[in-house]
Amino acid sequence: MDKQKLTDLGEFYATQRISRGYTQDQVATKGLSKSQISNFENGKHMLSASSLLLAIRGIHMSANEFFYALNNYHASTIQVLTARLIKIQESEDMAGASRLLKKAPKSSHDVLQNVMINSVIKEMTGHNQVTLREVNLVGNYLTSIDEWTEFELSIFGFCIEILDVGDVYWLAKEMLERTEFYSELVLNQHIVRRISLHVFAYMIVRDELAYAHYFRDQLKTLMHERWLTDWLRYNFLKKLLAFKLTKEPQLVGDMAASIDCLMMLDAKLLAKKLIKLLSATTDYAYKET
């Protein structure tokens, strides 16, 4: 690491440690000595990745919080893009989505971000601007990464609708089998839960009911009533899957009730998506109460 950057990082850590009232002795632990902390804070030596994590945890910060603060509390590029795409979906702002596209992408990561944007455009308009080559790029990139970060999770989450059933099943299954990797990352837990719900709906819509049952069962361990909108969406999708199998009329009323709750919570974008699913599967014409 560049000497100046090392000094800046060490000084920033020292500032965070002191502001939280910790001494170097209090932070020191097995695998991280007081002298290592001192040398790091004075810009003499960089800590190894594992030692840096110990140092950060020693002042009761998560790695996400530490580096977010280091970045002057600015969101990452992918967080900014994700927030913009969600707003575009809410407002169905086609022009806004088109403005985000990079006309001359300089790297594969730029291309991947363009694919995310075009996937949102496809969801809004039904018009697919994503080429087969770009679809393959998404699949190849995601399978090449052993441990997904927020960037990979965002790519997968936004690109589900352009991938085929086999790829979505395999990638989502791999994502869920890595839940231990996400267990301490609250934001990523949230993203994984939302992606899994999206995949569950994707499989129901395509009548891939065996796959749908798999994701229904996997979601049991990810869901809790405290995440109310996700909980309502999960219960709606369970009822939709059951209706596909039984055609039980009572299930239609139950699904409409879930939508009513989402409307009361002002989760209108999600409610709109569920109304569309309900209308496509049943003869029920939802009317807002």
Image (cartoon, rainbow, N blue to C red):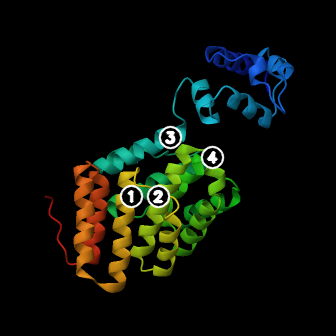
Q: Nearer the viewer, mark 4 or mark 1?
A: 1
Residue under label 3, please give it: 79
Q: Which mark sits nearer the N-terminus, 2 or 4? A: 4
Name the kind of residue labelled 1 in the image. Trp
Q: CA distance from mark 2 to mark 4?
A: 37 Å
Q: Is residue 156 shown above or below 76?
A: below
Q: Which mark sits nearer the N-terminus, 4 or 3? A: 3
Q: Which mark sits nearer the N-terminus, 4 or 1? A: 4
Name the kind of residue labelled 4 in the image. Ser
Asked which secondary structure carries label 2, the reply is loop
Please rate how many residues cluster around mark 1, counting C-alpha atoms within 10 Å: few if below 14, some from 14 to 19, many from 20: some
Q: Which residue occupies the foreground of this view, 144 or 262?
A: 262
Residue under label 2, please give it: 223
Task: Point out the image quarter for the C terminus.
Answer: bottom left
- Find residue 245 and name its label: none
Please rate how many residues cluster around mark 2, counting C-alpha atoms within 10 Å: few if below 14, some from 14 to 19, many from 20: some
Asked which secondary structure carries label 1, the reply is helix
Q: CA distance from mark 2 to mark 3?
A: 23 Å
Q: Residue at x 51, y 68 (%)?
A: 163
Q: Find out whether the residues at labels 1 and 2 contact each other: C-beta distance under 8 Å.
A: yes
Tell whether 109 sits left or right of 118.
right
Q: Is residue 82 shown above or below 66?
A: below
Q: Is residue 246 shown above or below 111?
A: below
Q: Which mark sits nearer the N-terminus, 1 or 2? A: 2
Q: Nearer the viewer, mark 4 or mark 3?
A: 3
Q: CA distance from mark 1 to mark 2?
A: 6 Å
Residue under label 4, please give it: 107
Asked which secondary structure carries label 3, the reply is helix
Q: CA distance from mark 4 to mark 1?
A: 38 Å
Residue under label 1, please give it: 231
Rendering coords of residue 37 (x, y %): 80, 21
